Image (cartoon, rainbow, N blue to C red):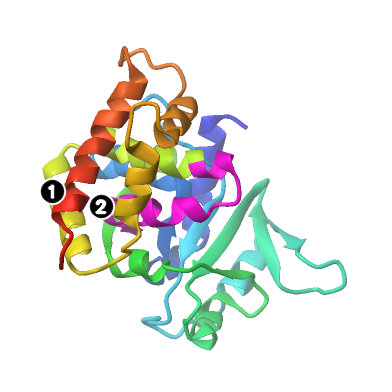
Amino acid sequence: MNVEKIEAIFFNVLEDICDYLPDLTLVGGWMPYVYSSFLWKMFLRNPVTTVDIDFGVDQSVTRDYSRTIFETLSSLDYKEHHLKMDRMFPVVLYKEKIPVEFITYPTVDIKAIEKMVGQQMQINKIDKFDFLLKHRISISVHAKKKNKSFLINCPKPSAFLYHKGATFIDRENKEKQAKDLYYMYFILRYAPDMDLILREIFQYRQEGHLISVPDNMDKFFERVSSQGCLLVEQENGPDEYIHDVRHDIFDRFKRLRETLQRGGGN
């Protein structure tokens, strides 16, 4: 599936659930695309790094919906993927071949979420996920072919980066670790106001959020030959704009590590 097709499906999904967008937060691998194209407004060759479309949901739903997301999408051209062969529910809905999934945190009031999403839907619970939902911004994204814009909630780039620094280490395989670390590098490399992002990360650290991040960064990015640098270099691939990608990765993460070290001792 080419990038244009993937983008078209992404915007089709946004249109299908546009009524619910005020109570959803886009997360996951679509963030590099959204940040670079619509927040930073810079052209990058291929910022789409995933096909899965993931939405975060919190218990503070702002309105009563006459239909659940499941009811709305089930009435359209979505296919159901049943997670257990002997049960009808829960399901994950697919737009063509792309899953549309929902994520929350373990201590959430699940009943409040199910009133909007639907009891039939699979809602994944992830530790530390509430941090992303508490530190978010609204971004207007524009579908050129539709000539239509959508206002979506997203984690602040600093929060997305910081959260990945806490959670990548728990991923079940090296491929997913590499993908998460690459998301961090993407922000460290392309964000136009890195000073602002580092100030916000300093504040998260001072407030005691996600305290494992400094140790994780030191463990994976202590030297140019450290595991983190190698994983990101492999995920980034050959780069026509940077002569020594591995050193660039090390230098950018070094600046992050220095910020995290200054933020200690609270």
Tell me the residue that label 2 is attached to. 158
Label 1, label 2: how many angstroms apart (C-alpha)? 9 Å
Residue located 52% across and 41% down the image: 50
* Quadrant in which residue 42 is drawn: top left
Q: Residue furthest right?
A: 86
Q: Is residue 210 positioned above or below 106 on the image?
A: above
C-beta proximity under 8 Å, tags 1 and 2: yes
Residue 82: x and y in percent read: 77, 64
Label 2 Cα neighbours within 10 Å, binned few <14 / some 14-19 / many ≥20: many
Give the SS element for disc 1: helix
Give the residue displayed 67% in from the left and 62% down from the top: 92
Residue 191 in view (yes/no): no
Residue 234 at x, y = what percent? 49, 26
Q: Amino acid at mark 1?
A: Leu
**Residue occupying the point 60% across, 78% down:** 118
Residue 251 figure quarter: top left
In this image, 101 relative to 230: left or right? Answer: right
Q: Which residues are magenta?
A: 151-177
| Magenta residues, dominant SS class | helix
Q: Percent from the top left, x then y, of residue 238? A: 44, 16
Q: Which mark is residue 196?
A: 1
Q: Is residue 44 left or right of residue 90?
A: left
Q: Amino acid at mark 2?
A: Ser
